[in-house]
Image: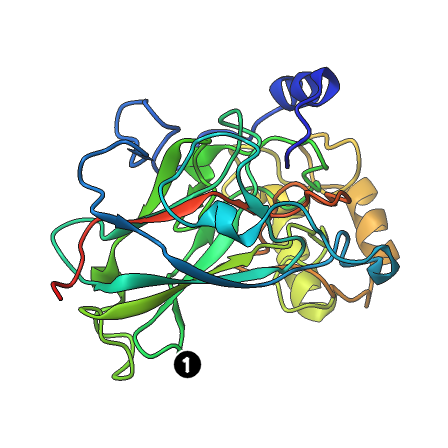
C-alpha cells in the first residue's frame, strides 16, 4: 500500500494490535529475524521477474487489476522506500530468477522485502521455491492473528503472530527464509540449486464463523463453537476465534450464537490459509491500484558458485 497520507498514518498507528504471539518481533527489537537491506551478507539480488497481477478487490472483479509499479522495481538491491515497488494485488504472483542459483547454507539463505512504512501495517505473501521453474514448494507459514474480526483496510497486525510469511517486516528489512526447512519436502526440489522464488499475495479476507478453515460454515464449526460456549479469557476452553459478535465482548454467549446462525452454510470464497489450516487475517480489502503485497526485492545470502 503506497498511500502515505496523514489519514492513513493516523489510522494505522492508532489501530489495536493483537496480544503478543510466540514468533520474532519487529525489526531492531531483541530476537528479531529481520535483515537490513545493507547487510553485508547479501551477495546477490533477483535479476529476472514475471508477474501475474491480482485484482484490486477479488470480491469485485469489475474493478480490474492493480497497476502500480514497474516490474523492474523488484529487481536489484532493495531500496527500502515505499514507492519503488511493484504491487501484486489480491492473489497476485511474482516469480523471480537469479544469475546464479540460491543454495542451502548455514542459517537463512534469502530474504524478501516489502514496503510497510510502520511495524504494524503489514501486507503478507506466501513464499515458494523451485529448482526447475516448474515444480514449486511452499514454506510452512503460520498466522495466529485472531479471525473473529476482519483486519480492515488500514488495520494493524502483530509481527509476533506471523511466521514464514513475506511482509512480516517494515520497509528496508527483509523477511528471511531458510532452505533447510524444505530439505526433504520432495525429491523434485534441490535446495542446493534454487533457480526461482515465487511470491504469492495473501488475500486477507476472513469468514469469522469458519473456525475450521474448510471454506464453509457447517457442523464442524458448530462443534468447535459448542466446545467454547460460555467461556471467557483464561478459561480452559476459551477460543478467541469464537467471540464473533461485534463488538467483541470476551465471552462466548447467545450473541455469538446468533451471529453463527446467521452465517450458517455461508461459503468462504476468498480466504488464504496457512500451513495449519488457519485463515490468514491481514488488511482487506485494499481496493486501490496499489493494493496487495508490494514487492521491493529478493536478496540472496547463499549463492551457488558458478
Give the quarter of the figure containing the C terminus. Answer: bottom left
Q: Which quadrant would residue 130 be assigned to in this image? A: bottom left
Mark 1 lies on residue: 134
On the question of residue 20 being in view, the answer is yes
Residue shown at 78%/40% (left/top)?
Answer: 245
In the structure shown, which secondary structural element does the residue marked by tag 1 occupy? Answer: loop
- Spot occupied by residue 49 in the image (x, y as percentages of width and height): 46, 61
- Label 1 CA crowd tier, 10 Å (few <14, some 14–19, many 20+): few
Residue shown at 77%/53% (left/top)?
Answer: 57
Left or right, 142 with respect to 233, comes to left
Residue shown at 58%/49% (left/top)?
Answer: 70
Q: Which quadrant would residue 181 be assigned to in this image? A: bottom left
- Spot occupied by residue 141 in the image (x, y as percentages of width and height): 42, 56
In the image, is residue 130 above or below residue 296? Answer: below
Q: Residue furthest bottom?
A: 187
Give the quarter of the figure containing the N terminus. Answer: top right
* Colouring scheme applied when the structure was drawn: rainbow
Identify which residue, 12 or 274, lies in the foreground. Answer: 12
- Spot occupied by residue 265 in the image (x, y as percentages of width and height): 81, 68
Amino acid at each position: 500500500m503506497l498511500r502515505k497520507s496523514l489519514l492513513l498514518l493516523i489510522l494505522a498507528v492508532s489501530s489495536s494490535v493483537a496480544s503478543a504471539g510466540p514468533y520474532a518481533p519487529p525489526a531492531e527489537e531483541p530476537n528479531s529475524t529481520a535483515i537490513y537491506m545493507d547487510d553485508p551478507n547479501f551477495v546477490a539480488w533477483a535479476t529476472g521477474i514475471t508477474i501475474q497481477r491480482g485484482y484490486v478487490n477479488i470480491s469485485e472483479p469489475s474493478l480490474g487489476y492493480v497497476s502500480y509499479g514497474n516490474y523492474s522495481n523488484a529487481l536489484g538491491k532493495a531500496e527500502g522506500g515505499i514507492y519503488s515497488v511493484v504491487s501484486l494485488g489480491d492473489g497476485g504472483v511474482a516469480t523471480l530468477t537469479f544469475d546464479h542459483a540460491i543454495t542451502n547454507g548455514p542459517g537463512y539463505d534469502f530474504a524478501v522485502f516489502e514496503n510497510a512504512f510502520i511495524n504494524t501495517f503489514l501486507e503478507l505473501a506466501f513464499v515458494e521455491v523451485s529448482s526447475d521453474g516448474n515444480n514449486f514448494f511452499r514454506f510452512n507459514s503460520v498466522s495466529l492473528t485472531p479471525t473473529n474480526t476482519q483486519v480492515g483496510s488500514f488495520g494493524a497486525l502483530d509481527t509476533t503472530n506471523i511466521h514464514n510469511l513475506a511482509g512480516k517486516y517494515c520497509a528496508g528489512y527483509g523477511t528471511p527464509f531458510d532452505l533447510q526447512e524444505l530439505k526433504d519436502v520432495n525429491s523434485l526440489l534441490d535446495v542446493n540449486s534454487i533457480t526461482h522464488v515465487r511470491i504469492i499475495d495473501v488475500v486477507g479476507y476472513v469468514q469469522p464463523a469458519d473456525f475450521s478453515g474448510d471454506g464453509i460454515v457447517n457442523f464442524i464449526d458448530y462443534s468447535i463453537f459448542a466446545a467454547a460456549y460460555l467461556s471467557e479469557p483464561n478459561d480452559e476452553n476459551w477460543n478467541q476465534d469464537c467471540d464473533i459478535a461485534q463488538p467483541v465482548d470476551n465471552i462466548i454467549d447467545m450473541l455469538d450464537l446468533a451471529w453463527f446462525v446467521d452465517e450458517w452454510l455461508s461459503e468462504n470464497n476468498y480466504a488464504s490459509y496457512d500451513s495449519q489450516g488457519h485463515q490468514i487475517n491481514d488488511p482487506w480489502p485494499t481496493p486501490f491500484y496499489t493494493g496487495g503485497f508490494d514487492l521491493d526485492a529478493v536478496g540472496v545470502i547463499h549463492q551457488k558458485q558458478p
